[in-house]
Amino acid sequence: MAESISFEPPRGMRDFYPEDMAWRNRVFDAFRAAGAAYGFEPYDACVVESYDLLARKAGEEVGEQIYHFRDKSDRHIALRAEMTPTLARMVAQRQGSLAFPLKWTTIAQCFRYERMTKGRKREHYQWNCDIIGEESMLAEVEVLGAACDALRRMGLSSADFKVHVSNRALLSELLAAGGIPSASHPQVFLALDKRGKMPDEELCAMMRENGLSDEDVERTFKILDISSLDDAAALVAPDSPAVANLRELFRLAEVSGFAQCLEFDISVIRGLSYYTGIVFECFDVKREFRAIFGGGRYDNLLTTIGGAPATAVGLGFGDVVVTELLKARLGADAAAEKKGVYVGFMFPEQRDAALRLAARLRAQGECVNLALRKAKPKQFFARAGASQCAKAVFIGPDDVVAGQARLKDLATREETTVEI
Ligand code: HAM
């Protein structure tokens, strides 16, 4: 007897049955439409990269989660955990010939060996929008505007989600004003980014291990209690560039019409070490789910991998969390609008008429699902109702004689006549 193997996909990986694809398409369609509406050009790249490009300093979670292996020629290869290093590599390769600023977008499958929790898989698709070579805040505004637009296209509004925005430079200024030496800031960022994911005592221990005194740790936590940009501004220099920067971002978002989707949140840090300025993370308003998307400004990544200097802003927006949120807010079977016509026949004698009608409707641009077998009317309409079609035509012997049949709207039950 054949040895039985599991029919489940490997842990953390997903299969997409048609009902799952309906959700995926709804999400991807919104990604593509929003990317196009904001003028981002699509690109793509290989899923495997050299391990050296992706591996980074210890302490960063993503670096530790990389799937990597040696190929048959002993090359150290990895599956991408995110798109940003690959994007940087592609830009660096053609840095002399590309026209900056460039706005690129992609939907990339990414792999991370994560602990499996709600909203976290070991494989996910991530929509990326990045602007390379633009220093002004308009880059942040366009990236954030595109992300909010995608959520709106999926059927969500600012009543469902908020983008929490901060500036790493402001947190640095606040830490410096609290007497915490700048050499410790990167370690403090990494520790604070884990807040909520591990107990505060463990974070304190992490910071102490990195040379912070008990007093410093206490001051660091106090900073996280700051709840408004005005309160933060009062603690740093009056001409703080980081504060001015954030005020400009909120102002431009107002002009652009999506300021209601943003809020200042000093606790947004981001786990990736390459961010240099504005950072943001989007959450559902009820805070039931993990982050919907995240990103920020990363002005040094090109030089870190050996390219020429180039400023950059971008975001990664996964498909997993937003799909969970959509199912919760819109209902589990609201994935796709029904469209097209289900065409069927009662006896083999009407099969040609059904096929001819299907061909004509398709030629007119209609989507047609042709029933492949004869059916009784009840059976046919039950199947039509369960299908993705909005309308149905059932052809019986009398219809062929009359040369016309009834086209039924499956939702309203209204009927019109079609020639057959
Ligand atoms: P990230 O915060 O690591 O950023 O991931 C961005 C988004 O990808 C998350 O907010 C979440 O929606 C999704 N995501 C990440 N890991 C998983 C997972 N294991 N399962 C399901 N969804 C996940 C980045 O990756 C940056 N490279 C984004 C970026 C682009 N920054 C600049 N440009």
Image (spheres, rainbow, N blue to C red):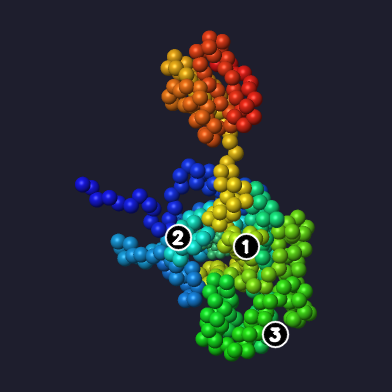
Measured along the vertical axis of the image, is residue 88 above or below residue 184?
Answer: above
Residue type beneath disc 3: Ala
Q: Amino acid at mark 2?
A: Arg
Q: Position of residue 5 (x, y in %)?
A: 30, 51
Q: Residues within 10 Å of mark 2 (few under 14, many from 20)?
A: some
- Distance from label 2 to label 3 (Cα)? 40 Å
Residue type indicated by callout 1:
Arg
The label shown at residue 177 is 3
Q: Secondary structure at mark 1?
A: loop
Q: How many neighbours does mark 3 have within 10 angstroms: few (below 14), some (14-19), or many (20 or more)?
A: few
Q: Which residue is mark 1?
A: 287
Q: Looking at mark 2, is its residue's CB closer than 8 Å to ligand 1? A: yes
Q: Residue 122's mark? A: 2
Can you tell which quarter of the image residue 113 is in? bottom left
Label 3, secondary structure: give it. helix
C-alpha separation, residue under disc 1 versus residue under disc 2:
22 Å
Residue at 54%, 86% (x, y): give it. Answer: 208
Question: SS class of the residue under badge 2?
Answer: loop
- Mark 1 / mark 2, whichever is N-terminal: 2
What is the C-alpha distance between the residues marked 3 and 1?
31 Å
Which of the two labelled residues, at mark 2 and mark 3, occupies the earlier sequence position?
2
Q: Nearer the viewer, mark 3 or mark 1?
A: 1
The label shown at residue 379 is none
